[in-house]
Image (tube, rainbow, N blue to C red):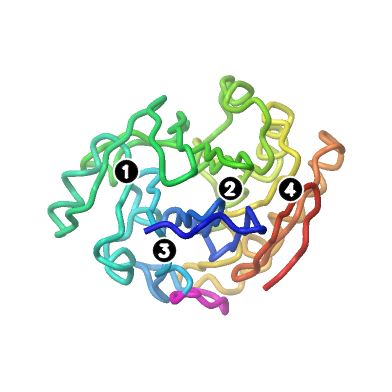
Amino acid sequence: MYSQPSASPLDLTYIGHGTVLIEMDGVRLLTDPLLRDRVGPLRRQGSKTHLDKCRTADAVLISHMHWDHLDPPSLRLLDPATPLIVPQGAERILRRHGFRHVQEIGVGDSTALGAVGLTATWARHPRSRHPLGPSADCLGFVMRGRFEVYFAGDTGLFPGMGSLAERLDVALLPVSGWGPTLTSGHLSPRRAAEALTMLQPRLAIPIHWGTYCPLGMGWLRPQFLSQPPYAFAGHAAQLTPEVEVRILAPGDALHLEGTGFDAGT
């Protein structure tokens, strides 16, 4: 199932929104797949989904049940045998949609995927799929191999961020949403930079931006599609100048080997 660890221990491809392909130590993990051009009122803006690359994933990590992070039609675009690692409370809805390779995990639980260890972390975010719908835990994930990577999912700031990892190499942090406003339980560019003061990673990559725009709101596109990561980088330079920030446009990739970073596509 897993490939042999190669000389390139970490490759990150920002697919868009909350979807990142993380390739580390021969293991390929795909977060919160949202791969359709149209999802409810949202329309994908320009970027490719890199569907062929996403189909190579060894496992899928689902952070929470909101419809823009747990999207059954997107999951059906992947190999049906791909394991889904989901928050406690989410397995039932996935099995109702026909998915059989589902593993629930709770806050603080750990599992292993090949040479990569995985720990579920708490996330400060609304639990319900919709106001009167089912609810489940909201998670982030810390992946540990030769590198240590934190995928925050969707979250607001919380005090325990500082104790999530001892030697965090990369933090994948949301900096926006899918519209011009953010409700509580999300990181704005400023709050994401404040998170860096607790997380202290070597490298931060802003995600959850630049991909989907609500129908009829294209005139607001620059404000919430392209500006958030640069605002985040500006705040980070003031608050944590020791943390490197790399902005990957949807579809771009980053290669990390040893102590250096090389951009790629």
Left or right for 159, reference 80 = right
Task: Give the SS element for disc 4.
Answer: helix
Q: Which mark is residue 86?
A: 1
Q: Nearer the viewer, mark 1 or mark 4?
A: 1
Q: Give the quarter of the figure containing the N terminus.
A: bottom left
Task: Provide the residue designation for mark 2.
Answer: 174
**Amino acid type, callout 3:** Leu
Task: Provide the residue designation for mark 3.
Answer: 34
Task: Assess whether mark 1 and mark 2 are in contact (beta carbons under 8 angstroms).
Answer: no
> Up-down: is 235 above or below 26?
above
Residue at screen point 48% across, 54% down? 27
| C-alpha separation, residue under disc 1 versus residue under disc 4 | 29 Å
Tell which circle, 4 or 2, labels the residue nearer the N-terminal end.
Answer: 2
Task: Give the SS element for disc 1.
Answer: strand
| C-alpha separation, residue under disc 1 versus residue under disc 3 | 15 Å
Q: Nearer the viewer, mark 4 or mark 3?
A: 3
Expressed as whole percent of the image width and height from the top left, the position of residue 107 reads 39, 27
Q: How dense is the environment of label 4, judged by Cα within 10 Å: few (below 14), some, or many (20 and up)? A: many
| C-alpha separation, residue under disc 2 versus residue under disc 3 | 15 Å
**Amino acid type, callout 4:** Phe
Task: Give the SS element for disc 2.
Answer: strand
Task: Assess whether mark 3 and mark 2 are in contact (beta carbons under 8 angstroms).
Answer: no
Give the magenta range. 44-52
Tell which circle, 1 or 3, labels the residue nearer the N-terminal end.
Answer: 3
Q: Which mark is residue 232?
A: 4
Left or right for 126, reference 189 = left
Q: How dense is the environment of label 1, judged by Cα within 10 Å: few (below 14), some, or many (20 and up)? A: many
Q: Nearer the viewer, mark 2 or mark 1?
A: 1
Q: Is residue 231 magenta?
A: no
